[in-house]
Image (cartoon, rainbow, N blue to C red):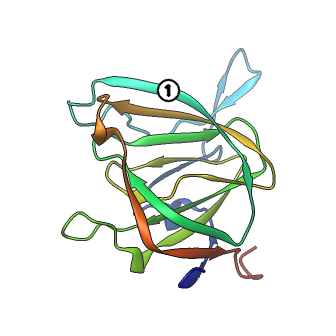
Amino acid sequence: MPARTIRAALLTAAAFAPFGRVLEAGGHASTANQGRAERFDTALDLATHDARASRLHSAVYRIAQSSLPFTVTVIERHPLSPQLFYPNSGAGFLVCACPVRTDGEPDLSALQAFIGTRAQGIVWNAGVWHSPLAALGENADFLMLQWQCGGPLDCEERHLPVAISVAGPAARDA
């Protein structure tokens, strides 16, 4: 049984900023593809990474559906590189993140949860402790991009000493 419950918030660029970036169409657009498309540029910089991570790796994650409340039992981080996830299918997703303590370990007392839509992607900053993605509503496929070294620094995991439950957003936030 989880020791405590946190409430998820809707994913916004401002709320997610301490942990990374939210990718979504919006703001200024330019015309592309002979006028058949709108192009929304982002300030995404996947080139900034530790030189030990010399290979840009891509993968598609097929994630089984989960529901709320969701139980977080493990968190992970990627110390050498940012990591991008963008949905190719699905209804929405849940992610959790927390600050890093001065000793490099996760500050679980400050864990936050976010619910994203099928029209939003995320880029984790390098070194941010976070939960694996949870697909909400239906199974989902996500494109992942990350610089990797082929070793244990590509992904560090921590099993939580006590599970944390994540509830849906408050009615006024939904």
Q: Is residue 42 visible?
A: yes
Judging from the image, what secondary structure is the residue with disc 1 in? strand
Q: Is 100 positioned to the left or the right of 7 in the image?
A: left
Please tell me in which quadrant of the rendered image residue 70 appears: bottom right
The residue depicted at 29 percent of the width and 47 percent of the height is 79
Q: Position of residue 121 (x, y in %)?
A: 59, 45
Say above or below: 100 vs 124.
below
Q: Position of residue 102 (x, y in %)?
A: 19, 70
Q: Is 128 positioned to the left or the right of 168 in the image?
A: left
Residue count near mark 1 (Cα–Cα under 10 Å), binned few <14, some 14–19, many ≥20: some
The residue depicted at 23 percent of the width and 36 percent of the height is 50
| Callout 1 amino acid | Ser
Q: Is 109 positioned to the left or the right of 28 in the image?
A: left
The residue depicted at 55 percent of the width and 85 percent of the height is 4
Residue that numbered label 1 is attached to: 58
Please name whichever residue, 108 or 26, is drawn nearer the observer in this view of the structure. 108
